Image (spheres, rainbow, N blue to C red):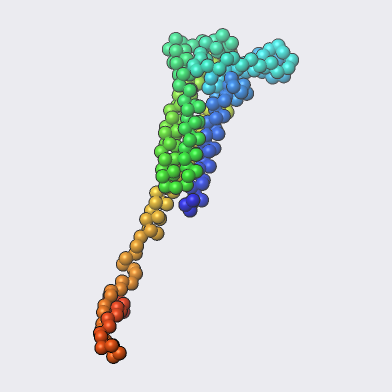
Amino acid sequence: MARTSPLHWVGVIFLLLASILLLVTTISAPVIGDIAILKVMLTNQTALRNSSVTFGTFGHCVLDVAPAATDQDYCYPKMVGYKPAAIMAAIDGTGFSEAASDSADGLTYAMILHPIACGIAFIAFLLSLGAGVVGSLLGAMVAAIAWIITLVVMAIDFALFGIIKNHVNSDGSGSNAYYSVGMWTCLAAMVLLFLGMFIVLFTCFSARKERKRNGGTYKNNRDTYVNGTDGYNDGYNGTTTTHTTRTRRKRFGLF
């Protein structure tokens, strides 16, 4: 394996961490009910804590449903695209305009980009493990694609759940909506993907430049020799024997 700069492995680790963080966002509610992109704390409460609604990539969960004295959680079936505005209107009586409701509902379909970005980021990590110039270049290119997708889906997340958050917090019901773990893992993954992509690409070109420098012939720095011949009379058989001598060519007229 080619010698690899330690900085290259920093970039590789960043790509791995980014894929793990995107995986966390992907498996948010309803896959794992306690992981949410947006969490809404409701005003009603059980004997333990307030009930809450957790929104994730493929749906939502309602946690600590009243009036149970123990945790009683309901996670709804996983699906691509769901209706967060209608869910909050039914649970908390939050009012949404038709435009806001349609916008929020439509944007949920784009959250399928979470697992896509996660998979592409992991592929970038595997390619970068090759540590060669080609592997690093391919890894950086794939990481760039993952970064663009992550940037797009993160912007969609903020737009989508920003609509829900603003309406819930301003409707006077007392419920409180806020961005949760899944949002921040997506943001952190976006930053790590950019750094990992830049580092892997930088070390790729650095390694290529070093290889060209070390693989040069250095023709201007080595001694060049020319062949010459001289003859002498062999006294034993009367023949002239020619032998080759190596004459060192002067450099700079000095030596």
Residue 199 can be seen in this image: no
Q: Residue at x 37, y 55 (%)?
A: 212
Q: Percent x, y for residue 25?
A: 54, 27
Q: Quadrant of residue 218?
A: bottom left
Q: Nearer the viewer, residue 32 or 179?
A: 32
Residue 141 can be seen in this image: yes
Q: Percent x, y for residue 15?
A: 50, 39
Q: In the drawing, does residue 33 fall left or right of residue 201?
A: right
Whether residue 102 is situated above or below residue 129 in the rendered picture: above
Q: Percent x, y for residue 121?
A: 48, 34
Whether residue 200 is situated above or below residue 102 in the rendered picture: below
Whether residue 107 is situated above or below residue 255 in the rendered picture: above
Q: Nearer the viewer, residue 124 or 194?
A: 124
State the residue lying farthest toward the bottom: 235
Q: Quadrant of residue 43?
A: top right
Q: Residue at x 29, y 78 (%)?
A: 244
Q: Residue at x 38, y 58 (%)?
A: 215
Q: Percent x, y for residue 211?
A: 40, 55
Q: In the drawing, does residue 155 fall left or right of residue 235?
A: right
Assign the C terminus to one quadrant of the image: bottom left
Q: Residue at x 51, y 46 (%)?
A: 9
Q: In the drawing, does residue 253 fall left or right of residue 212?
A: left
Whether residue 173 is situated above or below residue 193 in the rendered picture: above
